[in-house]
Amino acid sequence: MTIDYDAARAELNDEREKIVHQLDELGATEKGELKADTDFGDGFADAAAATAERTEVLGLVENLMILLGDVDSALNDLDEGHYGVCNSCGKNIGADRMQFRPTSTLCVDCKSSLP
């Protein structure tokens, strides 16, 4: 089985669009910055709740930014012609793994040898 690069690009672009939409729903830009109009409450009694909510939103935004970086990196690899090549050993990652996880950067052997 070989990698279907067109299908991979389409899937990665769809995933990118979903992540950007989720960021927008959280009140963040595509760069991970909270928009100025994001409201976390303004009363003194709400301060602790607002701080907790803001901390939770920032954590979610941070996780989404990591995912977005992985997707952008995979799209860049497609553009540069080394999509599906292990970043550690340089061997082909394999179509099954790339289909299962299109943002993979390591083959199964290299990934399993990580601590």
Image (tube, helix red, strand yellow):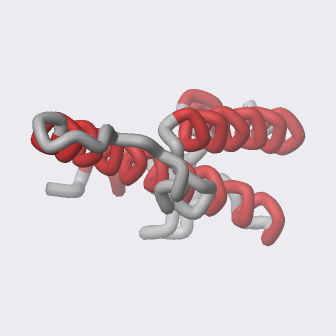
Place residue 44 in its image quadrant.
top left
Place residue 1 in its image quadrant.
top right
| 88 on left or right of 72 | left
Between 55 and 98, the one lying in front of the other is: 55
| 47 on left or right of 33 | left
The reply to whether residue 45 is in sight is yes
Identify the residue at image location x=31%, y=38%. 41
Q: Quadrant of the C terminus?
A: bottom left
Between 12 and 17, the one lying in front of the other is: 17
Q: Position of residue 42 (x, y in %)?
A: 29, 43
* Residue 51 vertical placement versus 110 (above, below): above
Identify the residue at image location x=22%, y=40%. 43
Between 75 and 60, the one lying in front of the other is: 60
The reply to whether residue 70 is in sight is no
Q: Position of residue 10 (x, y in %)?
A: 83, 36
* Residue 63 vertical placement versus 95 (above, below): below
| 67 on left or right of 52 | right
Place residue 4 in its image quadrant.
top right
- In the orientation shown, which residue stands out farthest toward the right? 6
- The total number of labels drawn is 0
Identify the residue at image location x=65%, y=36%. 21
Identify the residue at image location x=17%, y=35%. 46
* Residue 62 vertical placement versus 96 (above, below): below
- In the orientation shown, which residue stands out farthest toward the front? 43
| 45 on left or right of 31 | left
Between 97 and 24, the one lying in front of the other is: 24
Q: Position of residue 78 (x, y in %)?
A: 77, 59
